[in-house]
Amino acid sequence: MPDRIDPARLRALDRAHVWHPYGPMPGRQEPLVVESASGVRLRLAEPAHGRTELVDGMSSWWSAVHGYNHPVLNEAARDQLDRMSHVMFGGLTHEPAVRLATRLVEITPEPLQHVFLADSGSVSVEVAVKMCLQYWRSAGRPAKRRLLTWRGGYHGDTWQPMSVCDPEGGMHELWSGSLPRQVFADAPPDGFDAEPDEAYARHLRELVASHADELAAVIVEPVVQGAGGMRFHSPAYLRVLREACDEHDVLLVFDEIATGFGRTGQLFAAGHAGVSPDVMCVGKALTGGYLTLAATLCTSRVAEGISSGDVPVLAHGPTFMGNPLASAVACASVDLLLGQDWELEVKRIGAGLRRGLAEAAGVPGVRDVRVLGAIGVVQLDHEVDMAAATRAAVREGVWLRPFRDLVYTMPPYVTGDDDVARICRAVCAAAKEG
Ligand SMILES: *Cc1c(COP(=O)(O)O)cnc(C)c1O
């Protein structure tokens, strides 16, 4: 083992050489140095605002649903490590990938039968788009190669995903001139429980109908738009999209990378609407936050369409496709989730968030407070001062990462009631000071 780098030197090297998400070079913010993590706590290498331990309110961007350093996931990783951490997937196969794919087919909506294992969420969206375009190409309709989505979405940072992120509010405005031009519907009206707006449903139907000849697919995040603005909408609009797509020969893609594995209160958010997509992406919580892995699932119709075309293969194959280590941990994580009453845990956390965040509604500058599943959001009426908000949360002993006008949390499912209450105090403090 190399000698430890002391925290001050580590920060200096980080600043000099290491890019961080959506950051400049050299970095402007001082990142906290995490030394280790266990359960729902991050242990810092040096104290920050009097804290050396922070309760994680972010689940490392929706992924660490079982918390950190989980004995079952550690064991799965160690066991696989002793066999092999990786072998190529071209011409070879192995139990972790086969087991995981089979498990995913079992737990996702019935028509989804085939699984492409990708190395990140963004890549799984690229694969989903490629599947849809190639399906129509194989069917002799190559003009069907555009995508329709609604505003306010987020689908990742590589090229095709960027083209369906919100064209204004998102992080990719910069590239609007270079990206494929997609068809955008208005953002879905707010509110999971809101009465569906008939005018909006008509808007969706009309847009699908009028672009049907050039549309390969509609792609949306079902029920919760995450990084695009943490907005919730009625599941009824997913049924509208399903019907419109069926009527006009357009494929439907659900990006469940953030919503999958119970976060919204259903195992997959599609379950709120009782509809199933033709193609579905999962990622983030797939490995319980241990390793990068995502999957694109599709129906037999899509797979057979692609495989009977003039180029009868799906031309995609990442070097680390089906990585055994990640697949083994993913299997263990899915089993761990389904082996407990996860619905009850998500409900419990949701109830705690509702209780603890109610106070934020009265804070000046707060526009809205909303909770769905184990997601709690405080929306401000102004851009959050990220440094001030983060500092306020750290003082409360909690890690949060606010953005735009949002202070939000999606805690690990193993977060105890006291820690949920602490996270809520931190969100309220961050909303006040940010
Ligand atoms: C995070 C996210 C992605 C991108 O996943 P990466 O693993 O970061 O590439 C895509 N879609 C949604 C809905 C996401 O939340």
Image (tube, grey):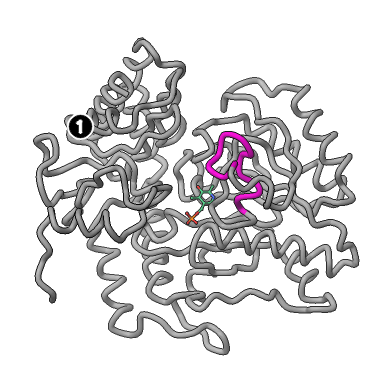
Report the predominant secondary structure element of the magenta stretch.
loop
Q: What residue would you read off at disc 1?
A: 418
Q: Secondary structure at mark 1?
A: helix
Residue 20 coordinates in the image, percent (x, y) = 36, 53
* Outermost residue, bottom side: 91
Q: Position of residue 398 (x, y in %)?
A: 22, 36
Disc 1 residue type? Asp
Q: What's the residue at 53%, 88% (across, down)?
A: 92
Q: Quadrant of residue 362?
A: top left
Instruction: List x then y, in percent, for residue 205.
Output: 82, 35
Residue 122 in picture, x, y percent from top left = 54, 57
Quadrant for the C terminus in the image:
top left
Please give the name of the residue rendered at 29% of the width and 26% of the height, measured from the top-left corner.
Answer: 430
Q: Is residue 26 above or below residue 396?
A: below
Q: Is residue 425 left or right of residue 374?
A: left
Residue drawn 21% across and 50% down? Answer: 39
Mark 1 Cα shell of 10 Å, populated few (<14), some (14-19), many (≥20): few
Q: Which residues are magenta?
A: 161-173
Compared with 336, 211 (above or below) is above
Q: In terms of depth relative to the viewer, which is nearer, 367 or 417? A: 367
Is residue 63 toward the left or the right of residue 224 in the image?
left
382 in magenta: no
The question of residue 163 being in magenta is answered with yes
On the image, which quarter does residue 403 sit in? Answer: top left
